[in-house]
Image (tube, rainbow, N blue to C red):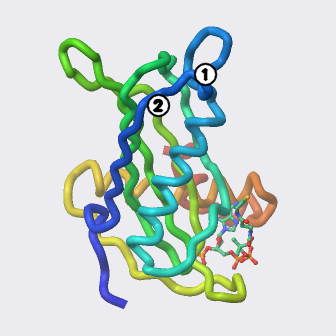
Amino acid sequence: MEAKHPQDSRTVMTDLVLPSETNPLKNLFGGELLARMDRAASIAARRHSRRIVVTVSVNHVAFKKTVPLGSVVTVEASISRAFNSSMEVVIDVWIEDRESGIRSRANDAIYTFVAVDESGSPVPVPPIEPQTDLEKERFDAALRRKQLSLVLAGKMKPQEATELKALFME
Ligand SMILES: CC(C)(COP(=O)(O)OP(=O)(O)OC[C@H]1O[C@@H](n2cnc3c(N)ncnc32)[C@H](O)[C@@H]1OP(=O)(O)O)[C@@H](O)C(=O)NCCC(=O)NCCS
């Protein structure tokens, strides 16, 4: 299968924060943000694989800043690395200052999706060819994150997570 670039799957979703989506402090519910990130990530995974995709794991979520009612929120997702049937999706969340228009990063997350056929069985996806320094950095780290995710899920023995172990030995 021909390699694709992270840019090919880049997905940008911009939306407002409405009153029904906030907590008593009038900030966006974490669950609502998780859902927005899942939707953007699933579109990115679909663009990369051109298959049906399902979320297999949410590997990392950092709620760094509150997102107040009325904020303009932009969720950006792209594939950082593809393995056999699985794809790591990196998601960045930005909020926009109403007066200056300056964007600041509010959150980030990493989800893993699997491409499946009509019966739900995993199918192969194209590899990723990173281009920029940031894409290369994310590509390299993705293998360690996959190993960590599989170890935590009880699907890989810690001693088999070679690249992950190397991180702690350096
Ligand atoms: C995703 C699913 C099809 C995988 O099926 P499976 O029998 O576990 O298949 P495999 O063990 O071959 O795993 C498929 C891929 O997922 C990866 N994977 C599985 N669990 C993972 C985890 N916790 N973290 C990271 N990757 C994982 C495997 O490493 C494999 O990757 P690769 O093919 O790129 O090497 C199946 O688990 C499923 O349907 N889950 C439910 C998905 C869903 O409904 N999501 C929405 C939640 S509401």
The residue nearer to you, when weighing 167 against 15, is: 15
Identify the residue shown where x is 54% and y is 55%.
Answer: 144
Amino acid carrying label 2: it is Asn
Identify the residue shown where x is 69% and y is 85%.
Answer: 121
Write down which quadrant ligand 1 falls in.
Answer: bottom right
Identify the residue shown where x is 77% and y is 57%.
Answer: 153
Amino acid carrying label 1: it is Thr
Question: Residue 76's x, y, as percent?
Answer: 37, 46
Badge 2: few (under 14), some or many (20 or more) residues near its Cα, within 10 Å? Answer: some
Q: In the visual, does 74 lie left or right of 115?
A: left
**Where, quadrant-wise, is the N terminus in this rendering?**
bottom left
Q: Which residue is mark 1?
A: 22
Above-or-below relation of 84 to 7: below
- Can the viewer see residue 65? no
The residue nearer to you, when weighing 37 against 112, is: 37
Q: Which residue is mark 2?
A: 107
Badge 1: few (under 14), some or many (20 or more) residues near its Cα, within 10 Å? Answer: some
Identify the residue shown where x is 31% and y is 80%.
Answer: 3
Question: Residue 79's x, y, as percent?
Answer: 40, 61
Label 2 secondary element: strand
- Can the viewer see residue 148? yes
Question: Residue 47's x, y, as percent?
Answer: 39, 71
Q: CA distance from mark 1 to mark 2?
A: 16 Å
Question: Residue 149's x, y, as percent?
Answer: 66, 55
Image quadrant of residue 113? bottom right
Above-or-below relation of 67 to 82: above
Label 1 secondary element: loop
Residue with the most extreme top position: 25
